[in-house]
Image (cartoon, rainbow, N blue to C red):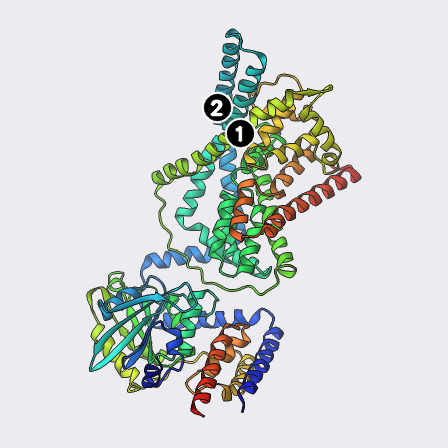
């Protein structure tokens, strides 16, 4: 037999093998893996006589938490509980902080006026910069200070690998890597971090899918906006037990939509641009550990809360000043913001939003944290003086700008689905090393956000719902 | 290089897989899950006679060490720590290709006695590739402390290969391990490795493909395993086979 004939034979055999593999669908790998694991389990059971009790306890908990029947409902319930604690706990300190900070604003205004400062300086510093800052701090700090420690506690407990375990099957079904469940979980913290975390996925195809879809879970910058809007519109700004529950449910629904879109887009990508089979991996479920409560609180307050807040403040301050300037420079009888928002208005209306919201999302590109402050400032500059002393006042402001339940819903959906923030896009550029994928990472979510919001707006208007 | 290749006789691809001239009598592969004390076993056996580098073409660290036992010079190859040999990470590929194509004289799988079940997955996968396997049941001291009792003879009986309980940290069981390595490498131990039997239809396909692969592969290589990998759609093994065929070609050209 000649050598080239051997290579030809090899090619033939490979073809035959792949034909057989295809008749089995995804089943061969599953069959092999489950057979090996089954044998290992059987063997271990016959030779290991006295295993330690802690492991047994761990396993019992795992059997419930990662079971087919209870895994998902437990995950949802836990997520809902976390949001419920966050929303109901954040309400009071949020209002106290707001009263305090806007008290300072008044005091600052008095100071500026009595010192004879020109109007524009007062405007830029107090009404622009300070108010922007105060908004970010009052609305974002309390939920973050509650949400992050709880989230860190779950991490410390060892729950997140179980989440990845539960979601692994879903991700594999859509042709993505099971580890994407982990990068997605990271995305709840920060999408840029989630994109970097995608390095744990070895296959370039699956890593790209994880990177391109990470944006569909709300990050820290967007959670506060989602929570605030659902507090206002779903809970009606009135903090009854029922309202808080409904608001938490709304945020859970948003997260679920985010995860569903993640899976749908992953599936679409793995069937089109990024074709291929999912690769399998072994996920070690670490033993449960009692979280170290004090270090967890300290760590999450300093590392996460302070970090995210500082970033928001650094971006929000200049953005606040800039927004005030644009809102107060008039061309003709309209401010610059008025002109741009007016120009965006028809498009905004078509997708159930308005020009100012679209503008806020565009200006909020550097960091999602500032979308709401920019929006508020733009509304304020157009309307009367507004004192933010409670969420009810915020609700009044939005209602005065013709916000409806549809606007609130589409605002949340657009926030959830739109293009990633500047930092995330830069990270994607760095991680993929390709401008093409970076552009796609911005275009895919934006198109989806517009399509979803447009369909909902048109549907609602057509059938006179909401 | 040519000299060592010929003098070692076995393992046509050994030199391709190792950045090192193997001069000893036996080449032994050391596999295992991460965190099983594999490195402790490696250090305990080889002492300071170590050599590190990267696996050819991969950014995975390759560590080799030498030791002498029972008049034999042994080269120990520390494979990357992996949970399985099925997925396609570079580490798993390196470990798998070395066990399959470099034909080590024996493969020692270090397992953590405190979580045997998880570790047995890798043992079973190694057994699918090569029967010259030794299970090093490490961390026995920790298992005793945790009151985990393992019926070692029963395990060895079921697996059909030697199982050596060790606590590498204290040097416990290492002499017996070295004896066993020499014995298995010299084909003096009777091995009846446990076979994984899959569904009937899969078994038929495996057998058909293995038969077709038969004339292509040298006798030591496990056809059944290669066939299974190909059915699984894991085409990375083809690179290994290609290398093998090319090497054979070169050899035939030189011979003629």
Front-lying residue, B205 or B221: B221
Chain of the residue on which disc 1 is drawn: A
Q: Give the label on residue A97, or none.
A: 2
* Residue A26 position (above or below residue A255): below
Residue at figure coordinates x 41%, y 57% from the top left: A285
Residue at figure coordinates x 57%, y 55% from the top left: A209
Give neighbour class at mark 2: few <14, some 14-19, many 20+ (Cα, 10 Å): many
Nearest to viewer (mark 1 / mark 2): 1
Q: Which mark sits nearer the N-terminus, 1 or 2?
A: 2
Q: Name the residue under label 1.
A: A316
Q: Position of residue B31 (x, y in %)?
A: 35, 70
Q: In this view, does A328 lie to the left or right of A201?
A: right
Front-lying residue, B170 or B52: B52
Residue at figure coordinates x 50%, y 8% from the top left: A115
Tell me the quarter of the image containing the C terminus of chain B: bottom left
Front-lying residue, A139 or B21: B21
Which quadrant holds residue A347? Answer: top right
Give the structural element (helix, strand or loop) at label 2. Answer: helix
* Residue A308 position (above or below residue A330): below
Q: Separation of disc 1 and disc 2 at Cα? A: 17 Å
Which quadrant holds residue B74? Answer: bottom left
Q: In this view, does A315 lie to the left or right of B83?
A: right
Give neighbour class at mark 1: few <14, some 14-19, many 20+ (Cα, 10 Å): many
């Amino acid at each position: 037999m000649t050598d080239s004939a051997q290579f030809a034979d090899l090619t033939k055999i490979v073809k035959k093998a792949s034909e057989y593999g295809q008749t089995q669908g995804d089943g061969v790998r599953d069959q092999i893996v489950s057979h090996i694991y089954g044998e290992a389990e059987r063997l271990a059971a016959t030779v290991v006589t006295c295993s330690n009790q802690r492991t047994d306890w761990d396993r019992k908990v795992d059997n419930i938490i990662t079971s087919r029947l209870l895994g998902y409902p437990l995950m949802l319930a836990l997520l809902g509980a976390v949001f419920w604690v966050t929303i109901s706990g954040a309400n009071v300190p949020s209002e106290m902080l707001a009263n305090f900070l806007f008290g300072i604003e008044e005091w600052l205004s008095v100071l500026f006026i009595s010192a004879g400062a020109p109007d524009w300086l007062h405007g830029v510093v107090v009404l622009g910069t300070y108010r922007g800052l105060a908004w970010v701090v009052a609305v974002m700090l309390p939920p973050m200070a509650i949400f992050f420690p709880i989230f860190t506690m779950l991490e410390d407990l060892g729950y997140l690998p179980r989440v990845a375990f539960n979601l692994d099957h879903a991700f594999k079904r859509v042709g993505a890597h099971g580890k994407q469940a982990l990068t997605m979980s990271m995305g709840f913290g920060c999408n840029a971090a989630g994109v970097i975390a995608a390095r744990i996925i070895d296959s370039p195809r699956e890593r790209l899918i994880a990177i391109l879809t990470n944006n569909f879970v709300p990050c820290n910058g967007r959670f506060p906006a989602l929570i605030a809007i659902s507090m206002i519109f779903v809970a009606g700004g009135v903090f009854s037990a029922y309202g808080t529950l409904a608001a938490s449910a709304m945020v859970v629904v948003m997260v679920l939509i985010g995860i569903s879109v993640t899976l749908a887009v992953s599936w679409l990508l793995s069937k089109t641009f990024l074709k291929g089979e999912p690769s399998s991996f072994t996920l070690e479920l670490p033993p449960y550990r009692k979280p170290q409560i004090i270090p967890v609180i300290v760590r999450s307050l300093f590392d996460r809360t302070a970090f995210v807040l500082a970033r928001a403040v650094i971006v929000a301050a200049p953005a606040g000043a800039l927004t005030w300037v644009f809102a107060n420079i008039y061309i003709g009888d309209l401010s610059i913001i008025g002109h741009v928002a007016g120009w965006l208005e028809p498009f905004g209306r078509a997708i159930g939003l308005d020009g100012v919201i679209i503008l806020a999302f565009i200006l909020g590109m550097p960091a999602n944290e500032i979308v709401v402050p920019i929006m508020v400032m733009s509304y304020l500059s157009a309307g009367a003086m507004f004192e933010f002393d409670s969420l009810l006042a915020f609700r009044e402001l939005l209602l005065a700008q013709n916000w409806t339940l549809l606007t609130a819903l589409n605002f949340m959906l657009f926030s959830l689905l739109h293009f990633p923030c500047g930092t995330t896009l830069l990270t994607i550029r760095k991680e993929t090393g390709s401008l093409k994928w970076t552009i796609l990472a911005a275009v895919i979510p934006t198109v989806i956000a517009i399509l979803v919001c447009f369909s909902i707006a048109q549907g609602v208007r057509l059938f006179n719902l909401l | 290089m040519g000299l060592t290749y010929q003098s070692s006789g076995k393992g046509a691809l050994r030199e391709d897989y190792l950045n090192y001239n193997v001069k000893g009598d036996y080449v032994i592969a050391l596999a295992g899950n991460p965190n099983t004390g594999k490195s402790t076993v490696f250090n305990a056996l080889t002492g300071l006679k170590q050599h590190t580098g990267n696996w050819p073409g991969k950014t995975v660290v390759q560590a080799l060490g030498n030791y002498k036992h029972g008049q034999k010079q042994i080269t120990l190859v520390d494979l990357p720590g992996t949970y399985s040999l099925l997925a396609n990470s570079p580490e798993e590929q390196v470990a798998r290709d070395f066990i399959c194509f470099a034909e080590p004289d024996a493969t020692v799988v270090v397992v953590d006695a405190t979580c045997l079940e998880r570790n047995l997955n890798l043992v079973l996968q190694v057994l699918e590739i090569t029967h010259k396997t030794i299970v090093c049941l490490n961390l026995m001291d920790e298992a005793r402390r945790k009151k985990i009792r393992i019926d070692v003879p029963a395990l060895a009986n079921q697996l059909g290969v030697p199982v050596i309980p060790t606590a590498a940290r204290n040097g416990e069981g290492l002499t017996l391990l070295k004896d066993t390595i020499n014995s298995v490498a010299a084909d003096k131990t009777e091995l009846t490795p446990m076979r994984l039997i899959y569904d009937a239809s899969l078994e038929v396909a495996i057998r058909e493909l293995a038969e077709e692969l038969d004339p292509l592969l040298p006798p030591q290589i496990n056809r059944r395993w290669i066939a299974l990998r190909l059915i699984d759609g894991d085409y990375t093994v083809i690179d290994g086979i290609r290398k093998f065929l090319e090497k054979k070609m070169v050899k035939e050209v030189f011979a003629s």
